[in-house]
Amino acid sequence: MMEKRVVFREDLCKSCSLCVNVCPTNVIYLADYLNGKGYRPARVEAQEECISCAKCGQVCPDQVITVLRPEKKKQTM
């Protein structure tokens, strides 16, 4: 299973769609269900297509997005 690269606090998301609009790979979408506050939370299904650019986290007004960047492997000579 692919490690998550983007984690949303779905319970706090207010469906503003800023993250959906800014994502360069178009992997973020609004869910077809409602969270406890009555909003459709943002989600990512295709984690492997996320490039961990963190643009979504930068535009989120409620800071509900955490972007995890995989460690780069150091090259040895």
Image: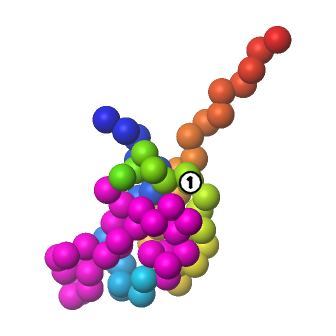
Residue 25 can be seen, yes or no: yes
Q: Which residue is drawn at 45% across and 66% down?
A: 26
**Position of the C terminus by quadrant:** top right
Q: Position of residue 2 (x, y in %)?
A: 37, 39
The answer to if 19 sits in the magenta stretch is yes
Residue found farthest to the top: 77
**Secondary structure type for disc 1:** loop
Left or right side of 52 for 4 = left
Q: Where is residue 27 in the image (x, y as percent from the top left)?
A: 42, 62
Q: Residue at x 36, y 79 (%)?
A: 13
Q: Position of residue 12 (x, y in %)?
A: 35, 78
17 in relation to 58, above or below: below
Residue type at mark 1 is Ser
37 in relation to 24, above or below: below
Residue located beneath label 1 in the image: 52
The answer to if 43 sits in the magenta stretch is yes
Is most of the magenta stretch helix, strand or loop? loop
Tell me where the magenta segment starts and ends, as one range: 18-45
Residue 11 can be seen, yes or no: no
Q: In which quarter of the image is residue 32?
A: bottom left
Left or right side of 62 for 58 = right
Q: Where is residue 35 in the image (x, y as percent from the top left)?
A: 22, 78
Residue found farthest to the right: 77
Q: Residue at x 43, y 45 (%)?
A: 48
5 in relation to 26, above or below: above
Q: Quadrant of residue 6?
A: bottom left
